[in-house]
Image: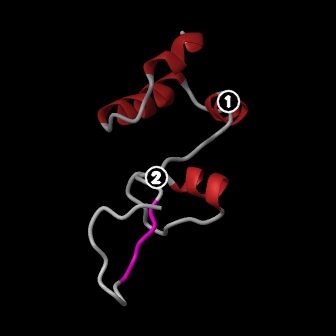
Amino acid sequence: MRSIKPIPKGGQIYNTYGNLPNSDLLRRYGYVIPGSKGDIVEITSEMVIETLSTLTKEEVERRVEVLDDEDMFEEYLLSGFD
């Protein structure tokens, strides 16, 4: 471990793994940070397909629009749903 600045005797030291989402922190290091800002959610393709199959085309389009507006959507994921 290296310090980015001098550490005074008795000073607080923080060990950080970078700006990782909780999913990576849990998988790699075994802990999470409540309220982590860069957090992501991982879902399976089976869950996406199961959920989409219960919705009308208009409901799917509305949800895609919301994700797109929030810049949270990868457009290539819909390539099989046209």
* Residue under pointer 2: 39
Q: Mostly what secondary structure, the magenta segment?
A: loop
Tell me which numbered mark, 2 or 1, is placed earlier along the sequence: 2
**Residue at horizontal 44 percent and vertical 19 percent from the top:** 75
Dot 2 crowding, Cα within 10 Å, few <14, some 14–19, many 20+: some
Q: The disc labelled 1 sits on which kind of residue?
A: Ser
Image height of 64 relative to 76, above or below: below
The mark found on residue 66 in the picture is none
Residue in the foreground of this view, choosing between 73 and 33: 33
Q: The disc labelled 2 sits on which kind of residue?
A: Asp
Label 1 element class: helix
Image quadrant assignment for residue 31: bottom right
**Residue at horizontal 37 percent and vertical 90 percent from the top:** 10
* Residue under pointer 1: 45
Drawn side of residue 31 relative to residue 34, left or right? right
Mark 2 vs mark 1, CA separation in Å: 19 Å
Image height of 63 relative to 8, above or below: above
Magenta-colored stretch includes residue 15: yes
Image height of 31 relative to 27, above or below: below
Residue in the foreground of this view, choosing between 11 and 40: 11
Label 2 element class: loop
Residue in the foreground of this view, choosing between 59 and 11: 11
Drawn side of residue 44 relative to residue 41, left or right? right
Nearer mark to the viewer, of 2 and 1: 2
**Residue at horizontal 43 percent and vertical 66 percent from the top:** 35
The colour scheme of the drawn protein is: secondary structure
Report the span colored magenta: 12-16
Residue in the foreground of this view, choosing between 17 and 8: 8
